[in-house]
Amino acid sequence: MTTAALQAERFEIPDDIWAAQAFFEEKGWSDGLPIIPPTEERVGQMLAATKRKPDEVIGAVPPRWAQATVEKIAINGVMAGCKPEYMPVLIAAVEALTDPKLNLYALQATTGGPAVMIIINGPIRKQLDINGGPNALGEGWRANATIGRFVQLVKRNIGGSYPGTTCKATLGWPGKYSICVGENEEASPWEPLHVERGFKAEQSTVTAISADASIRASDLDSSKAEGILINFAQKMDGPSGPEAIMVICPEHAKIIAGDGFSKKDVQKFIWERAAYRMKDLPDETFDQRVKRRSDLKLTRDSIIPVTDRPEDILVIVAGGDGSQSQYIHVWGQSTPEGGSTRSVTKVIRD
């Protein structure tokens, strides 16, 4: 493919890194961090890493509903600092972002300010050095940092989500810069997320899910599954949502599985204990909950589980040594139809 086939508008800017950053900031194309200028050569290298045509439309990104072509994905990938070999992952991520189930429009427009968390499964984790081990949700891995950042740039530069205008986040949170993790499948005693969702173990996938905030679920004391899981459930008390994410560290996972708990057992145990108690709510909050979920026939004695169903608690294993897991709250409302947003898993193709 030659760069002459590119359709994006060209801009000439001074060959100066400070001038380049000022240009991107003026255009509103920056997330506040330094941008790598997407030259024709760099974009061409990204496009050479996929079999997809540059003008192929992968999806429409709200709230602008602009078309995310493979070329635009490559451009934003360069800007985020991605390597060319990440392109198949980036394309799959946009497929997930633009799936109606995720309801990205609602995520972009809410005052809640959620991020879109990316979970990567399959052999591609090793091929691209995507971290699922020590500090898996922290800094230090280019693939995790730049793939997560790419998602935010797509939401901004293609979707037109700008803080204070189309993006209505009251506060937001640091996960909006980047939140991407590989599942530590090798350390997991259970089937990985993508296999649980019907994909083959040898396939690689991207899962996109609304992520609102995280809470450290530390437990250095329990030597039995029940103690660890009770501690997990206590971290998850609060407003129910369409889904929830439990990132279990390998040490906790080993203890839990060693006591005979399957992943379904984990989901059921937590679901039965993590709850939102109607008797504790202020009157106005209680009244609104009753209106939103008239199907539940709520009373002051009602207890709402953290999700409508146990299987709506996503359980993944990630992290290194230590007894530190995390609960990640999923933004959105539980509804009779299944929730205002749902996680989406897409297979990664060349």
Image (spheres, rainbow, N blue to C red):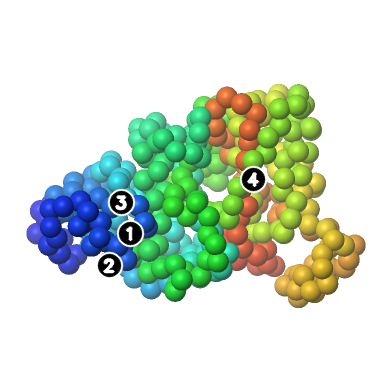
Which element type, helix, strand or loop, lies under badge 1? loop
| Crowding near the residue tagged with mark 3, few <14, some 14–19, many ≥20 C-alpha atoms within 10 Å | some
Look at the picture and state if 37 lies above or below 338. above
Would you name the residue on which mark 1 appears? 30
Question: What is the C-alpha distance between the residues marked 3 and 1?
Answer: 8 Å
Residue that badge 2 annotates: 27
The image quarter in which residue 18 lies: bottom left
Left or right: residue 175 versus residue 23 is right
Residue underneath mark 3: 34
Dot 2 or dot 4, earlier in sequence: 2
Does residue 24 appear anywhere in the picture?
Answer: yes
Q: Nearer the viewer, residue 317 or 190?
A: 317
Residue 190 visible, this orientation = no
Compute the Cα span from label 1 to label 4: 28 Å
Residue type indicated by callout 2: Lys
Q: Find out whether the residues at labels 1 and 2 contact each other: C-beta distance under 8 Å.
A: yes
Q: CA distance from mark 2 to mark 4?
A: 35 Å
Spatial CA distance of label 1 from label 2 is 8 Å
Residue wearing tag 4: 215
